[in-house]
Image: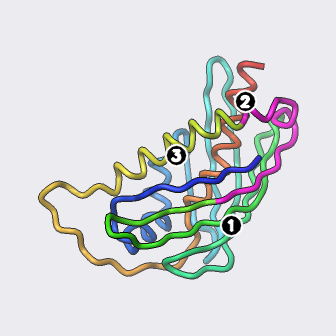
Amino acid sequence: MQLIGERLICAPIATTWQALNDPEVLRSCIAGCESLERTGADLLSAVMAVKVGPVSARFKGTLKMSDVKPPHSYSIAFDGRGGVAGFGSGVAEVMLSQEEKGTRLRYKAQAQVGGKLAQVGSRLVDAVAAKITEDFFTAFEARLQPPADAPQPETEAPRGVPAWAWLVGAVLVCAGAWILTHW
């Protein structure tokens, strides 16, 4: 599976980078994410519960960041396990650039799936992944919108594992859960 896309985030690059490194912000933007914890300087662990129709599944995963160039880019290696539902693993690249109207966020991810996830057609998995990705960005962009009367402060760009990368794993997990209920 390959995910490639970009979004214009209506926030300065430092604010966007900071939000991408805040596990609480991202936990609130990923549907079903129960926990997202920093377990090392460049390492996160996550637990995500997914309920689609009568099927409930719980997935656990990790992600590790490398090649960090704050606040412009990083690479992520991720691995998620969902028991009999299967697993997903892969790598992602995230790139940020400042534009006049905000921050351009570009991403590329390559993922492999196994177990029951691997038994379904890639078109179905891709369609579900696209929906989950859109839902994440809608929530993330809404979270970064300041109140109409609030000035936008300049913030420092922190270094740490960007929890956004868990989105890639979450997409695989949610796609698998959805597929299992419709298989």
Residue lying at the far front of the rendered structure: 100
Earlier along the polypeptide chain: callout 1 or callout 3?
3
Residue 173, image x, y percentages: 69, 41
Q: Residue at x 43, y 79 (%)?
A: 157
Earlier along the polypeptide chain: callout 2 or callout 1?
1
Give the colour scheme shown. rainbow
Q: Please determine whether, in this image, residue 72 is positioned above or below residue 61.
A: below
Magenta segment: 108-125
Residue at which label 1 appears:
76
Residue lying at the far left of the rendered structure: 149
Residue 97, image x, y percentages: 47, 72
Magenta stretch contains residue 74: no
Circle 1 packing at 10 Å, graded few (<14), some (14-19), many (20+), is many
| Lateral position of residue 91 relative to residue 160, left or right | right
Q: Please determine whether, in this image, residue 140 is positioned above or below residue 70.
A: above
Q: CA distance from mark 2 to mark 1?
A: 25 Å
Disc 2 versus disc 3: nearer the observer? 2
Three-letter residue code for mark 1: Ile
Residue 45, image x, y percentages: 65, 59
Question: Looking at the rendered structure, which numbered label has been put on residue 30?
Answer: 3
Q: Please determine whether, in this image, residue 159 is positioned above or below residue 10.
A: below
